[in-house]
Amino acid sequence: LKPPCSYSAETSPPATRDLTPTPTPQRTEEQGAVTAEMVLIPLIRDYIDRMLQDISGMKVGMVSVVYSQSDLLRKEVFLVETVDDASSSRASMAHLKAVYFLRPSSDNVQKLRRHLSAPRFAECHLFFSNILKIPQIQVLADSDEQEVVQQIQEFYADFCAIDPFHFTLNIHNNHIYMLPTVVDPPGMQSFCDRAVDGIASVFLALKRRPVIRYQRTSDVAKRIAQETSRLMYEQESGLFDFRRTENSSLLLVIDRRDDPVTPLLNQWTYQAMVHELIGIENNKVDLKEFANVPKDQQEVVLSAVQDDFFRVNMFENFGDLGMNVKRMVDDFQHLSKSSQNFQSIDDMAKFVSNYPEYRKTHGNVTKHVALVSEMSRMVEERKLMQVSQTEQELACASGQAAAFEAVTSLLNNESVSDIDRLRLVMLYALRYEKESPVQLMQLFNKLASRSAKYKSGLVQFLLKQAGVDKRTGDLYGNRDLLNIARNMARGLKGVENVYTQHQPLIFQTMEGIVKGRLRDADYPLVGNHFQQGRPQDVVIFIVGGTTYEEARSVALYNAANPGVRFFLGGSVVLNSKRFLENLGEAQRISKSSTLL
């Protein structure tokens, strides 16, 4: 059995733990360093590289959002299966070596136990994405009667790295954070355990043990912060002992309900807009429902790692994006014409050698044209430019009378969809819940009469969950004198684009951290650990989910402030549809629960 590779301080890898019965090299102080390039996607790619590099020959493995099928083929991975698919097959594959990469859940360990009791592969190399418990190791050892297991290691990648500074945990019961613990204690425990595991994995990959803070008004944020602290400083203190990085990092756990506005808004930058109108799941977009999309483009990948056009344009607004897509189409048409004009054998040979790149470019052009075309159609059908202008004014400007008139007009517009009507009333309610209760009731009644699918009381339930009395942050910039002055200055200057003027609350939070203005009373520390100076690495974890608008804000802030790196993570990645589904499910359970 081979021990892990040794690395110099300059190429220090993300943390791992070898659980095979062989001597493991001692980690030196210098190996606690993480290079500036070690952002989330390269961290996960490095883990997969290291899983595959020392296992020669054909193998079966797993695929991640950070690795394409072509990348895996180059590593001699010729078959990719889920552990469930592998369980249902009985065919022997003694010519293959298996690389398992699994979450160390009880369910996965039991599936693996069955695989080892009747092995199909010549060798099994086991990698777990988080901390494996001693009893689980014993179960695997007892099951490996034919001694096919060659190694067991922990590679801390228990999160989905969507972008370099953005990760998600894809927690399926995301609505549970809106409910008191007494409603579903096992469900809440499972939710918190998954959040703690994911956060711990991120910090192990980054080789950091952070100072931990949380949003005071959120019980679930407090619970996750305290359980994460217990894991890092008590239960697994040795594993997190990266001495040279103490106090240089911060974990801030906050609640989605402190900024309910951002997930309710229409989006006008490429990545966020695709997720809002169509949906992105682990960097994949499903276009099967759309009639005009070519068959080979009915499921496409939107990844900044694999798609240069997307990497450059993911944060561009819709108008600039349209111009850039047109430019890409023109360039491809020029390339197509030149490729058809063969003057010699050498020209033909050159075309054949460049054909894979030509095919890739053709696929990219078709993909982006299809996405932009479908989104343009939806914008026109749903009158989203009119809707979005009113949304932005509700989020960013003051003026209750004009806002009431604008929302009423859109509620009466037959072209406006039910979900857009609901979002408009919610945005109005969040902004003016204390100022105009009579007019707010008029909007509730009109919404109920115009939208057949509207669930009675859903807007009121949102106010109960995320109204002004529940929030900590200065959501509308009208509590803090500094924010009021900043908003006045923005108003005097005017806005560059009325559809993208909204700035998510997380921007204020990042500013507060960098400038030391985050109040201890609002965001208490866990334990006796204090921040000394400005942190270098900050993970902001949003219980209830992140948005791509917030991810864009984090990426742009990092680019403009090289002295600090912010990472954004959450239980899911939200769009307005998912946010409203979670809200509706929490409302349904609240109504039916005898404990509330």
Image (spheres, helix red, strand yellow):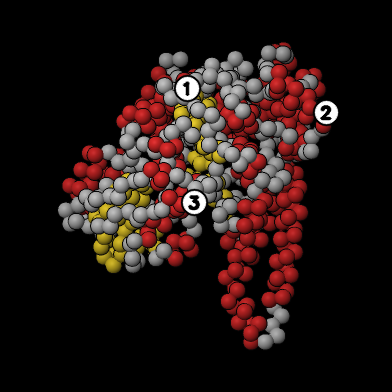
User: Which residue matches tag 1?
Assistant: 525
In which quadrant will I find the N terminus?
bottom left
Image quarter of residue 150: bottom left
First of labels 2, 1 by sequence position:
2
User: Which residue matches tag 2?
Assistant: 492
Regarding residue 110, the answer to whether it shows in the image is: yes
User: Quick one: 162 or 274, which is closer to the camera?
Assistant: 162
Pointer 3 local density, CA inside 10 Å: few below 14, some 14–19, many at least 20 = some
Regarding residue 582, the answer to whether it shows in the image is: no
Looking at the rendered structure, the secondary structure element under dot 2 is: helix
Q: In the displayed structure, would residue 356 be above or below residue 55?
A: below
Looking at the rendered structure, the secondary structure element under dot 1 is: loop
Pointer 1 local density, CA inside 10 Å: few below 14, some 14–19, many at least 20 = many
Residue at figure coordinates x 30%, y 62% from the top left: 97
User: Which residue matches tag 3?
Assistant: 42
- The amino acid type found where label 3 is placed reads Pro
Which of the labelled discs sits on residue 358, or is there none? none
- Percent from the top left, x then y, of residue 160? 47, 44
User: Quick one: 55 or 589, which is closer to the camera?
Assistant: 55
Distance from the alpha carbon under mark 1 to that under mark 3: 31 Å
Distance from the alpha carbon under mark 3 to that under mark 2: 42 Å
